[in-house]
Amino acid sequence: MSGSVLVQQRATAAGSAIRVPKHATPKIVARKVSKLYPTPGSRKDFTTVLDGFDLTIHDGEFLSLLGPSGCGKSTFLNILAGLDSYNGGSVRLDGEQVTGVNKNVGVVFQGYALFPWLTAQKNVEVGLKIRGVGKAERRERAAEVLKTVGLSAAADRLPHQLSGGMRQRAAIARVLAYDPEVLVFDEPFAALDAQTREFLQGELLRIWESGEKKKTILFVTHSIDEAIFLSDRIAVMTKAPGAVKTLLDVELDRPRTQSLRSSEEFAHIRARVAGILAEEVNVGNDAA
């Protein structure tokens, strides 16, 4: 059986779990996206990473992308951010085809990507400077977002003088400074200790919920608990070649509090997501 047919069967079998929020406006629409990479050591063979990838993310929604290692989560994030191309299908943002880097999409990676010779304030100003924002406005906007992420007191520190959590907050502030409509996060808290990670999850929700208009967020993670705590919906992917297997609504009240993690509702969702992931990891193993 070909990879494409297998993916389609797996995704279709889970279709009954997919629910679309009422009165939601599509912000990002991916349809039948495919992505191939040349196989190392071969000039003719290709490895299919995404195949038949379908996903709609609604305006102001917080959606997390979960899946087995190598399923193409970060690949789709890079495609949406305009950092990578795709071989088939379509990806649209506000109805326009994604063909490259878009100023309305901000990216936060696991690696902080801060310039080591610049202070936190100057790092936040970088994106604004590239966009031609004047010096005085850059300073004002950077100071504003540093206050939002709780780094005002560290504005004049260099990255090596900041803790890992502070560096990640500076990276988030740099993206927030130029006010993109869509934020994409590629496992931004994965390298942090558990306590700092949970703290920053709460901080991210505080920032997201405090805006006049909630930004649309795509959040790639390997952590089931992180996805549940943060998200409105969770998209669980198949093994490579990746497609969306199941979309789950996270029907938990907002604002989210840390005590929610120990609730019966949280545990129920965790068990369901873990079961879907385990099922996918075991696809094809029965014949072994």
Image (cartoon, grey):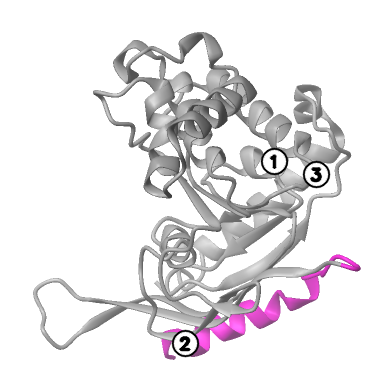
Residue 155 or residue 276, whichever sits in front: 155
Residue 34 or residue 170, whichever sits in front: 170
Residue type highlighted by circle 3: His
Q: Quadrant of residue 79?
A: bottom left
Q: Nearer the viewer, mark 2 or mark 1?
A: 1
Kindly indicate whether the residue at mark 3 contacts the one at mark 1 (C-beta within 8 angstroms): no
Q: Where's the N terminus, which quadrant?
A: bottom left
What label sits on residue 4 in the rendered view?
2
Residue 8: in magenta span: yes
Residue 224 shown left or right of residue 184 in the figure: right
Query: Callout 3: helix, strand or loop?
Result: helix
Q: Height in image: 77 above or below 97? A: above
In 3D space, how far apart are the residues under numbered discs 2 and 1 (Cα atoms)? Answer: 31 Å
What label sits on residue 268 in the rendered view?
3
Per the rendered image, the range of residues in magenta is 1-23
Q: Quadrant of residue 249?
A: bottom right
Q: Earlier in the sequence, mark 1 or mark 3?
A: 1
Identify which residue is drawn at 46% across, 11% down: 154
Check disc 1 and report the residue beneath it: 230
Residue 104: in magenta span: no
Residue type highlighted by circle 1: Leu
Where is residue 179 shown, x and y percent of the image? 59, 46
